[in-house]
Amino acid sequence: MEKEENKNTNPDNLDKIKEKKDKSKTSENKDLKPEDRIKELEDKLARAYAEIENQRRRFEKEKDDAFDYGGFSLARETLNLVDNLERSKIALENDENLKNTEALKKIVEHLIIIKKDMLSILNKNNIEEIKSIDQKLDPNLHQAMMEIEDDGKEPGTVVQEIQKGFMMKDRLLRPSLVAVSKKTNKKDENSKQDQKSEENQSKSNKK
């Protein structure tokens, strides 16, 4: 058995088997009628053309994506600069030594101008801020970080923006980090009211 297996796995034997198969195919092709032979060649040509067309479309899509989104990673990193400008502004405004000084006003004005210029450059390159405040939470655009009780808003409405999100054309560059509204817990409110009324009762009884 082992000798037979070795014979079958021998490269020379494999070549012979392949050669036999090719010969059988050619003999089958010779047996075909001219009309069938033409039809077979037409099918092969159609498949080859379809494959070439698919490759061409893939290449065109890759080329368009490279042109439209080639700076995707750079754009995402640039957003960190925008965030740092905003953080610097907030830190300076909270500095007790600088509060209500002319120096602080000038620095903040410059930071605001720089931030506006950066956002303008991003907009020119099809990078825009995602609208979040008062919008319904969209998992494709927003990432909820916390819930805030607010009976004046529909549950799941964005009421606070922790970090701005951005789109690059039709692609998400980064989601907005937000806080969303939720209804107040009526049970907690009722229990608090009951507790207060009990305390008031006990006070009146002591008197």
Image: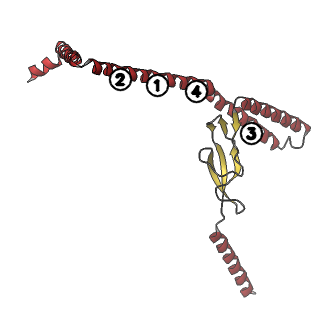
Q: Residue at x 77, y 32 (%)?
A: 120
Distance from Cα at disc 2 to Cα at disc 4: 33 Å
Picture coordinates of residue 155, whole percent (x, y): 65, 59
Q: Which mark is residue 87?
A: 3
Amino acid at the residue labelled 3? Arg
Task: Farthest residue to the top: give it.
Answer: 12
Question: Element under label 2?
Answer: helix
Q: Which residue is mark 4?
A: 65
Amino acid at the residue labelled 2? Asp
Amino acid at the residue labelled 1? Asn
Distance from Cα at disc 3 to Cα at disc 1: 49 Å
Q: Earlier in the sequence, mark 2 or mark 4?
A: 2
Question: Seen in the image, is 89 located left or right of residue 49?
Answer: right
Q: Residue at x 70, y 36 (%)?
A: 128
**In-front residue for pair 128/200:** 128
Indicate the quadrant where residue 101 lies. top right
Picture coordinates of residue 95, whole percent (x, y): 81, 42
Q: Which residue is mark 2?
A: 43
Question: Quick one: quadrant of the C terminus?
Answer: bottom right
Q: Earlier in the sequence, mark 3 or mark 2?
A: 2
Question: Element under label 3?
Answer: helix
Q: Earlier in the sequence, mark 4 or mark 3?
A: 4
Task: Evaluate if marks 4 and 3 touch, with contact meaning CB atoms under 8 Å apart.
Answer: no
Question: Element under label 1?
Answer: helix
Q: Earlier in the sequence, mark 4 or mark 1?
A: 1
